Image (cartoon, helix red, strand yellow):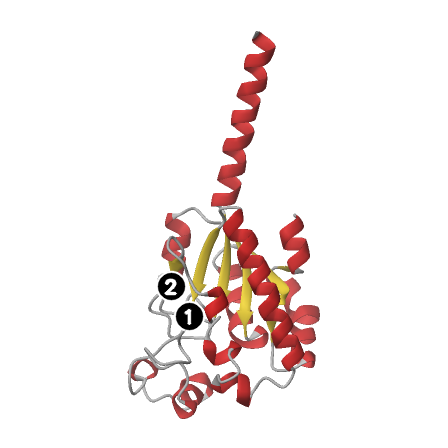
Amino acid sequence: MRTTFLIILTLLTMNQTQGQTKAKSALILIETQNEWMHSEGKLYRALVTDKDMMHNSIANIEKALDYARQNDMEIIHVGLRFEKGYPELANGKSGLRKAIPNAGTFPINGFGAQFYESVKPIDGEFVVTGRVGASGFTGSNLDVYLRNNKIEKLYLVGYATHVCVESTLRDAHERGYDTFLISDGTSAFNRYQQEYVLNDIVHHFGEHLTTQEFIGQ
């Protein structure tokens, strides 16, 4: 009888521990929007030269998201969208603050800003608001959500690897999060940019792993 009680107590403790571990991890989807992922997206058409890498990343994001949903992992969608006239960027003179208004990307309620159909948020998944910069944390409610929900381990997928994904990775590291980049669940404009980030940048701010490694851990 005592042995049975101890076994039940052990199983309950294991389940509680596993639940706490899952609650402290999150899959973060960065800019999984039509602008990047749809064949009619402005950035897909203008900047993505390695279409095979992009299509592969889409398939792997779908796999990672399906795994996270099946395992009750926190899922966070970090999009980008701007009001008409891009007032949030305050007439930027350089960088993305200049390029985004010039390109007319991510207009609020526009096609490009909509989440890509196969990975769009469902009920219960957190959609970040207020973001205005390259990092998913800039101007947004991402950090406060993570801290209030005691999430410490972040897995990043999305676009572009060498711009907003890298910026979010760096920012997460500086804020004390344990951060992983899912390498084949991201895509840069070309293979050179992708490999540069994976080989020379990521290890300074976190780690990278494949979708299969993420699913199998």
> Residue under circle 2?
128
Disc 2 residue type? Val
Label drawn at residue 59: none
- Residue at x 38% of width, y 52% of height: 124
Residue 3: image x %, image y %? 60, 11
Q: Which of the 4 image quadrants contains residue 127? A: bottom left
- State the separation of the CA atoms marked 2 and 1: 7 Å
Element under disc 2: loop
Residue sitting farthest toward the front: 117
Q: Residues within 10 Å of mark 1 (few under 14, many from 20)?
A: many
87 is higher (above) or lower (below) than 6? below
For the residue pair 198 and 27, the one nearer the viewer reads as 27
Element under disc 1: loop
Residue 43: image x %, image y %? 51, 84
95 left or right of 48? Answer: left
Q: Residues within 10 Å of mark 2 (few under 14, many from 20)?
A: some
- Residue at x 55% of width, y 65% of height: 157
Residue sitting farthest toward the top: 1
Q: Is residue 171 visible?
A: no
The quarter of the rendered structure image containing the N terminus is: top right
40 is higher (above) or lower (below) than 61? below
- Residue at x 53% of width, y 27% of height: 13
Disc 1 residue type? Gly
Residue 185: image x %, image y %? 60, 66
184 is higher (above) or lower (below) than 67? below
> Residue under circle 1?
79
Q: Is residue 131 visible?
A: yes
Q: Which of the 4 image quadrants contains residue 86? A: bottom left
Q: Are marks 2 and 1 in contact (CB under 8 Å)?
A: yes
